[in-house]
Image: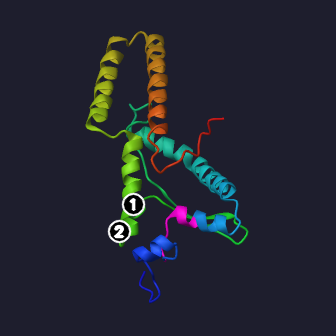
Amino acid sequence: KDAEDFKITDKDIEAGTSSKRTLETVYKRLSEDGVDVNLLKLKIADLIIKTLISVQPDLLHNYRTCQPNDRTFNMCYEVLGFDVLIDSDTKPWLLEVNQAPSFQTDSGLDYQVKKAVISDTFKILGATEDTRQKNLDRIMRDRELKKMHKQSTLFWNQMRGEEFAKEIEERRMHQLSNLGGFYKVFPVED
């Protein structure tokens, strides 16, 4: 961004010639150059999925340690930044994964892209005060029910299993209807 020939004007952004570009602008240019963009997206999704699967056991352990009462995974999330290089054969290569990607905005384009990421993240999470209170109420209710049914472990597990399945399905449907600029890569529906 400090180079003499760095371009970031609105005109350059609109023309797709700026030094920083949206992902859609890059995909459009690649498509114009004859690249099968849908195949490239699948390859990138595959790379991301394999990366996350490789660390999933550690992530689950850390999550369970910090949030032992949250069996539906509603209390935590993380935005990861995947830096991907596309070679001349349009093969994607993972350069790095940023656990805490920068949300600093040096330009209008940065602001536009990063605001959408943050906004869409909160939409997909359903992060509202009502949701927060609902989760806290459920945790308190679970603690009370556990005390009442100490001798009835089977009853407890069956009741919570049905509730978990319902909560997970509700969350899945909420996420799918609030993707914004995101698209789901895993698990696949078919």
Relative depth, front residue between 176 and 156: 176
Secondary structure beneath dot 2 equals: loop
Q: Quadrant of the C terminus?
A: top right
Pointer 2 local density, CA inside 10 Å: few below 14, some 14–19, many at least 20: few
> For this rendering, which residue is in front, 187 or 67?
187
Residue 58 drawn above or below residue 190: below
Mark 1 and mark 2 residues within 8 Å of each other at the beta carbon: yes
Amino acid on which the number 2 mark rests in the picture: Thr
Residue 28, position as x, y percentages in the image: 59, 64
Q: Quadrant of residue 77?
A: top left
The answer to which image quadrant residue 171 occupies is top left
Q: Is residue 76 visible?
A: no
Residue located 50% across and 46% down the image? 59
In the displayed structure image, the side of residue 110 where residue 173 appears, left or right: right
Residue 154 percent across, percent down from the top left = 48, 12
Q: Is residue 174 above or below residue 159?
A: below
Q: Which residue position is annotated with label 2?
A: 105
Mark closer to the chain start, 1 or 2: 2
- Which region of the structure is painted magenta? 19-26
Q: Position of residue 99 (x, y in %)?
A: 45, 58
Quadrant that contains the N terminus: bottom left
Foreground of the two, 115 or 137: 115
Q: Secondary structure at mark 1?
A: helix
Q: Is residue 22 magenta?
A: yes
Residue 45 in view of the camera: yes
Q: Residue at coordinates 45% horizontally, 44% vertically from top-left?
A: 62
User: What residue sits right under mark 1 in the picture?
Assistant: 114
